[in-house]
Amino acid sequence: MKKIIINSEPWETRIAILQKDELLQNLYFASHTTQQLERSYFKGTVIKVLPGIQTAFVDIGQEKAGFLHISEVDRSLALKRMAQSESPEDSDDVVEDDEENKEPLLCELNMDKIFHEGEHVLVQVSKEPVYEKGPKLTTCFTIPGRFLVLMPNIPRVGVSKKIEDPEERLRLRKIVRDILPKAMGAIIRTPSEGRSEQELIYEIKYLVSIWETIQQKFKDSQPKELIYQDIDLTHQIVRDNLDSDVEAVVCDDKAVHSALYKFAKQIAPELAMKIMLFDQKSNVFDYYSVSEQIAKALEKKVFLKSGGSLIIETTEAMTVIDVNTGKYIGSKNLEDTLFYTNMEAAEEVVRQLRLRNIGGLIVIDFIDMTSSNHRQQLFKSLERFLKERDKFQSVVLRVSEFGLVQMTRKRTGKTLAQQMMIDCLCCKGRGLVLSVKTESYAFLRTLKIGCIQNKYGSVINASVHKDVFHYVVASEYNALLNFEKEFGKKIILSAHQDGFAMNKFIIS
């Protein structure tokens, strides 16, 4: 069973999903002053096409232009546009095969024949801006619902892997195929299991109507205009997670509680009673120990129950996770101790990936094990944990002889650290600063050059960090005396009293 905890404030909404033992699994933020781009539709303007990297840059009215790669262009759209570019009079002869099981048409796609600078194109944001990159765009459109995700221009029907009954998979696939308009597809989600045909018909018609509205707005809207945005984050979380496994949805705001209760009555009336109002005087996140768990999720070291630990370090290119035995020494032989620690670490790694919203390339350095059977069990367990507990797509390679596992996980939005933290102003995000000795010598060099260039008067006032002050006075005071003698100056050295960074010093 799990709980959904919603903390609503005038400035921000925070949503936490707790699993058994009220352990934090997912965390979401929605600032009331920041626009959420992911899943939104825009009427974009193509500003640059780079055929060398098969990418088009599209202006959607944001700080940075979005980038649209050839892999994110709907194939039928690409073939149609290429045909129009090469032979406009024969363009109607190029048609994408709608059958799911047939081989796709083999054709080399060229970005400069699909899009041209200055033209307007309907795009959807698939990923929020990350670091220096603008938003990632797609023309493989999706419109999410509770039971399925509509793919209005991809004629395929997929079923969630979590629906394991073969007969139920066939039943759902047949219902959806019969209802969907031609050339449309859908992904059947886990909550659709056991649902009636009427419920699925109602949702498909609703999602198709949204698509028709998007198409009409594209024709009527201005360039770079937002055309369609998904429901707010609070309703999204309830829509995507409210099922029989949810024990309660706890809200601390009466207006939010009322809105969610009405929403639940529409999409899942049998579960509406699980929407509850938190009426305690304390903060709801503090009451459920969410705040404490958030603080731990921002640390790079994660302690395991056995006494082992994980060290999680993220760069722009990848995330590296190191597994250590720590205090755990086991009760049997060394190999069993290492295996137990690795198995516990694999489960915790999956939780941390979800909680910290880590995506992209991930390398996990498990503790090296000599047993190939243990390495195989570890690999299968990691795959199983990802499949059962993580909704995002991932690909895992087998454990190497060095105990390394390479994997990728779909990147979506910003990581927890990106949402809550900034780079240190002293170390610029490196995690290291220059030593007191190095900074002291830098100060002395600057002072000497200034004296040589005669930048100062006869009396020099130098204010430095207190640690630099103590080091120079204790170890390099003779250098100051030599400067006074060599340049005929009087040097007055003092320590900062306002907590300046070590590399800040004032000489006048």
Image: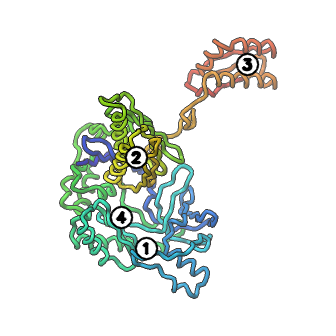
**Image disc number at residue 353:** 2
Q: CA distance from mark 3 to mark 4?
A: 68 Å
**Image disc number at residue 144:** 4
Q: Closer to the N terminus: mark 4 or mark 1? A: 4
Q: Amino acid at mark 2?
A: Leu
Q: For the residue carrying disc 4, how many other residues have a C-alpha within 10 Å: few (<14), some (14-19), or many (20+)? A: some
Name the residue carrying label 1: 153
Q: For numbered disc 1, what is the local secondary structure?
A: loop
Q: Which residue is drawn at the image coordinates 36% and 31% (left, top)?
A: 334
Q: Closer to the N terminus: mark 4 or mark 2? A: 4
Choose between 376 and 324: the one closer to the eye: 376
Tag nearer the camera, 3 or 4: 4
Q: Closer to the N terminus: mark 3 or mark 1? A: 1
Q: Which residue is drawn at the image coordinates 35% and 55% (left, top)?
A: 391
- The reply to whether dot 4 and dot 2 touch (C-beta < 8 Å) is no
Q: Which residue is drawn at the image coordinates 23% and 53% (left, top)?
A: 245
Q: For numbered disc 3, what is the local secondary structure?
A: strand
In this picture, residue 178 sits left or right of residue 128: left
Name the residue carrying label 3: 460
Tag nearer the camera, 2 or 1: 2
Choose between 420 and 459: the one closer to the eye: 420
Q: For the residue carrying disc 1, how many other residues have a C-alpha within 10 Å: few (<14), some (14-19), or many (20+)? A: many
Please tell me in which quadrant of the rendered image residue 64 appears: bottom right
Q: Which residue is most to the bottom?
A: 89
Q: For numbered disc 4, what is the local secondary structure?
A: strand
Q: Position of residue 500 (x, y in %)?
A: 58, 27
